[in-house]
Image (spheres, rainbow, N blue to C red):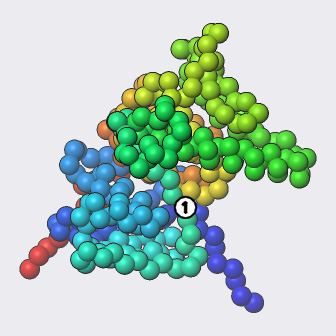
Amino acid sequence: MATENPKITHIERVEIKGLWGKYDIDWTLNRDVNILVGINGSGKSTVLDLLYGHITGYLDWIYRREFYGDIIVFSKNKKIWGSNSGKKYSSVHDSEFDLKADWVSTFDIDFQPLEVIQKLSNENVKTTLDWEIHNLITEYKGFKSQILNRVIETNDKSILDTDKKCQEIVNQAFSKTEKKILINGKSDINFQVGDKTLSPYELSSGEKQLLIILLKVLIQDNQPYILLMDEPEISLHLDWQEQLIDNIHQLNENCQIILATHSPAIFQKGHWDKITYMEDICKELIIS
């Protein structure tokens, strides 16, 4: 009797061979939370970029790092192997390895490329975070439509619980500035402040960033996902940093978090055992 292949729900190990032509990386990961720590310039962001590009097939993430070497991701005796020996990156993966990954942007900079502006009717989209919010609201509308259809089909209103939990987390985080999330029948997202209504584009950088993280995780629909975040503490209030990991897992317990940070607040509430130091997974190449 044939046995079924185990479903891949997370990454178990990553090998990066030839980082900067100087190092090999060998990193064994936790199922739930992985926190990469190291000094500036030690390669944390590069490791996350290479990993995201490798899993998703977005090769620009690999090329922009000018990486020439091998990347291997392992899980459940399956792997994705990739190599860039020149200008062309080649990748081979086992057919069962279909794990999805999300990336969270943290920097709020002017973002007005002509080809994007020409496609947008929303004049409020002016920065990278605005662009993320614009796309996520569109995805949220599709997600909300799907879960409402599931409620109709199954008569199970508990399907809406995670969406409600997301709104509760946002309202709690924004309570000190008296903002409350408003979602209308078309699933448009706005915020109530006293007698005024604000669009999400009028939020502060930190508020936008937190909203982006929570919406991305919500839309994952409690499915196995890799969530990669590079310095998610940027612009976030200290309380939000401390609660970030737990809030993510309230919305998707099947999300494997992989992040790089300089902030102890991210891991100080129960996640010290999830820290990996760059120097512990880096081995200098011996070139004969």
Q: What residue type is labelled 1?
A: Lys
The answer to which quarter of the image holds residue 66 is: bottom left
Residue 109, position in %: x, y?
34, 36
Residue 269 visible in the picture: no
**Outermost residue, left direction?**
288
**Outermost residue, front direction?**
118
- Count of residue discs: 1
- Please indicate whether residue 171 sits to the left or right of residue 267 in the image: right
- The residue identified by callout 1 is 100
Residue at x 88% of width, y 48% of height: 152
- Please indicate whether residue 137 sits to the left or right of residue 276 in the image: right
The 10 Å Cα crowd at callout 1, few under 14, some 14 to 19, many 20 or more, is some
Residue 273, position in %: x, y?
43, 46
Q: Relative to 160, is 14 above or below?
A: below
Residue 179, position in %: x, y?
59, 18
Q: Which of 263 and 86 is in front in this view?
A: 86
Q: Relative to 286, is 147 above or below?
A: above
Quarter of the rendering occupied by the C terminus: bottom left
Residue 20 visible in the picture: yes
Residue at x 75% of width, y 90% of height: 1
Residue at x 30% of width, y 76% of height: 88
Q: Relative to 73, is 127 above or below?
A: above
**Outermost residue, top direction?**
195
Q: What element carries label 1?
A: strand
